[in-house]
Amino acid sequence: MIIKKIYIGGWFQRTTLHLSEIWDFFKYKKSLIDFSEEDLKNTQSKLNIKDLSRESGPLEYIFVSTLGGINYRIYEDGLMIFEKETQGDLRNDFEIIKDYYDQNFSKAISLIFSKGAPVPKELADIKSIFPYILIIEDGSDKDIDNIFSLFKEEIHGEVMGDGITVYRSEQVIVINGVHDEEIARSIAETQVFFREFKAQLHRYLGIHRLVWEKIDDIKDRGEIKGSKIDVFMSELWGYQKTINLIEARINQMGVYLRTRQKVFNFDKIDPKIVSLFQFKFETLVDTHEYIKYLWTMTKNYLDSAIGIFVELQNKSTKEALSSLQLVTIVNVLGILANTYLLKQKFPPLFTYSGSLYIVAFLILAVVINFIIAFIYRNKKYSLKKMSDIVKNIK
């Protein structure tokens, strides 16, 4: 068995504008954003760049060769592929790439894209460098089994065609029999894109469930104290911010999918292998459309829930204003009672007696306001209308 190359990679939505920013940073240690020169130079130096070039093709990309023997390509659509020739210890070789990705590359990219729209906490940890991909020649069944055993993985799928066999597990892909390096890389890139695209959709599905369950949890309370309205409102507004940011990402994903499908080199690959990728593309299109529909439902569900709380907040505010009016009325009545019923005049304001009168009315107003505010904070508002939310989103 001959191990030709090993690959890992990742993908996140980017454009040629972002590629230009990466190029300026990698090549010239500069950025259009106001970062300190020291931060830019220190971070760039840790990339250990040996050679650097910007290449054209179906998609423009930056090619980087490092002093440690790791080469990688950053494409304009955000796909990143890291490759290395193995030194014999596969696990160690993958750890070398993974360590470079985590400690050097990821920190550099995080720096130059650290400003802009904030990333919600639900999306903060979306980095992934799986699957591990091996390109081999003349691998026997025993060789294949040994590779997957080394990573403690089980083979879940196997596709054969024109001397090429693709073996897959959860985190490892072995491509056996590819002699053309360009085809091998094309297959590796597509596999990474498939995994990352699907993984992002799965994360969004998880966030959908999280938001939906949170609204259900609020709904199932049946009623809510006035003091809790602002707390739940703040939480729901936070989810709305997350949903709006994710909606933009979901809507973009279809463009990247079509682009990747166009640039994949179908003509040079056996039809049996091609059918696998065509099926995958079609499956991702269907899954993407499903998530878009589901996300619309999630957004409408959340908007309806927020609408209910806005109504409750307005009602609570109106009642609070009514309490202030009551305090004012009580004060006026007190003055009238003192003046007309008791036939007493207020003493001059700037005297001891006048000050006592003012203090007495202020204390009375504060006590009444406190009592009323306490009542409204602990007053329970019905959430029965929350059951109508699902009807509203259909």
Image (cartoon, rainbow, N blue to C red):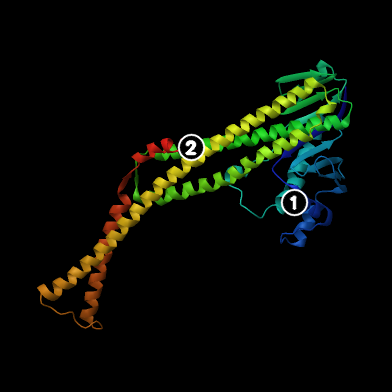
Q: Quadrant of the N terminus?
A: top right
From mark 2 to mark 1, how far is it between C-alphas?
A: 36 Å
Res 155 visible: no
Residue 203's disc is: none
- Amino acid marked by disc 1: Leu
Q: Say if 388 sits above or below 241 in the image.
A: above
User: Which residue is at 70% across, 24% downward?
Assistant: 279
User: Which residue is at 18% across, 73% downward?
Assistant: 335
User: Which residue is at 41% across, 40% downward?
Assistant: 218
Residue extending furthest top?
Answer: 141
Q: Secondary structure at mark 2?
A: helix
Residue at which label 2 appears? 212
Quadrant assignment, res 222: top left
- Amino acid marked by disc 2: Trp
Res 248 visible: yes
Which circle, 2 or 1, is nearer the viewer?
1
Q: Say if 24 sits above or below 182 in the image.
A: below
Q: Position of residue 362 (x, y in %)?
A: 26, 70
Residue 17's disc is: 1
Q: Is residue 154 left or right of residue 246?
A: right
Q: Is residue 54 left or right of residue 151?
A: right
Quadrant assignment, res 329: bottom left
Instruction: State if disc 1 and disc 2 touch (CB < 8 Å).
Output: no
Q: Position of residue 60 (x, y in %)?
A: 81, 44
Earlier-in-chain disc, 2 versus 1: 1
Q: Secondary structure at mark 1?
A: helix
Looking at the rendered structure, the number of numbered marks drawn on it comes to 2
Q: Say if 177 sits above or below 235 in the image.
A: above
Q: Nearer the viewer, residue 347 or 305?
A: 305
Q: Nearer the viewer, residue 239 or 94?
A: 239
